[in-house]
Amino acid sequence: MRRSHSSVSFVVIATFLLGFETFAGDWSSVAINSEMAGWDISNKEVWKAEEGVLTGKVTGSGTEWILGPTSLSDLEIRFEYQADAQVEMGLLVRTEIIEGKPYGYNVPLCGKVVSDTEVGLKQLPVETGATTLKQAGWQIGALRGLDGEMFVRTASGLGQRFTDDQYTKGRFGFSISGPVGAKVRIRNIEVRDWAAEAGYTSLFNGEDLSGWVVHGEPEQWSVEGNLLLGESVGDEYGYLATVDEYKNFSVVADFFGREGGNSGLFFHSKLKGTDITGIQAEVEPNYGGQSGFLYESGGRGWLIKSEDIKREQDRAFRPNEWNTMRVDVTDDNHIRTWLNGMKMTDMKNEKPLHEKGVIALQIHSGGGMKLEWRNIQIRVE
């Protein structure tokens, strides 16, 4: 059974996972040792790991956090934890670090945790009474995240349902604050990837251009080492478009800019040679800029004003790394885009040029551009 895919879904259960479908997939244990390799830590004086137990000790008035090495969209996580009286503890999910600051979801495990303005985290609106924690003994915490409904249950047994789609991918971790000296302890962390349950299928087979049509020079597109390579040649634009057209869908793709230039992930688009009309999610593969924002070719141009771009959105792009773009189109031409899990645009297209069309990758004119793509997947709604 696949859940609804209209928005982000979490299930947080602080006692036991009950009443949910069981999905196949292996659990992976998360190493807790003195090295904590791959973890981002706000203050190494706060977080210590020894003999399989991660301990956080409040040393000041601010919020401290620790973030694990694995970035996932759809996942399940389970762990055990203890917390001293009056400590405020949160579970971070779908969270990334931008300019030293975490952005993502903060799920209260005990106390009120932190506000959005303090560290850039979005706190799930769990009622105060729902965050009551039994202080004695180890508590069991668990979370499931899959596009669809959001359901939160805490140690007191209270539960709430709601939806949110601000963040769709990121790492998990923990936050603490409270009186100086208060501690939390965490052990037996396990994670399971639910990607297979999200309902996506591959658009690119990793071997050749089957299912795609080249518009422009054939040498602009090739497959090397399971990667799709776009490379500019001369002053010609180039497009690689799907054979099929799509109306309502979710498409996800990773891209890496090896050399300069400009690109885009087009959708609801029509092509005549290299003349294209439709909407693109901007891809600026070396400097970020407006990556993830929408531009209508053959129509209105930019569909978002530069003054509406928040600083964290402008910094969501990761230079010289793989980046992930996601575009969702649902009924009534509702368009949303995310870059590296952070929502970039959310709009209803009131005057679409096309109600459906191909999905296409662009190579800009001017030469000197190399862009790699991988993991191009689609879910038809």
Image: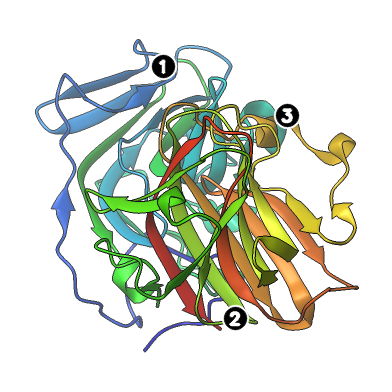
Q: Residue furthest bottom?
A: 1
The residue depicted at 83 percent of the width and 61 percent of the height is: 298
Question: What's under tag 3, amino acid-wise?
Answer: Arg
Q: Residue furthest left?
A: 51
Of the numbered discs 1 and 2, the one sitting upstream in the chain is: 1
Task: State whether residue 185 is above or below residue 212.
Answer: above
Query: Mark 1 = which residue?
Result: 181
Query: Mark 2 = which residue?
Result: 246
Q: CA distance from mark 1 to mark 3?
A: 34 Å
Q: Secondary structure at mark 2?
A: loop
Residue 311: mark? 3
Q: Position of residue 374 (x, y in %)?
A: 36, 53
Question: What's under tag 1, amino acid-wise?
Answer: Gly
Task: State whether residue 79 is above or below residue 115.
Answer: below
Q: CA distance from mark 2 to mark 3?
A: 32 Å
**Image-quadrant location for residue 62:** top right
Of the numbered discs 2 and 3, the one sitting upstream in the chain is: 2
* For discs 1 and 2, the disc positioned in front in the rendered view: 2
355 or 348: which is nearer to us? 355
Q: Position of residue 104 (x, y in %)?
A: 55, 43
Q: Is residue 248 left or right of residue 28?
A: right
* For discs 1 and 3, the disc positioned in front in the rendered view: 3
Task: State whether residue 280 is above or below residue 371.
Answer: below
Task: State whether residue 28 is above or below residue 355.
Answer: above
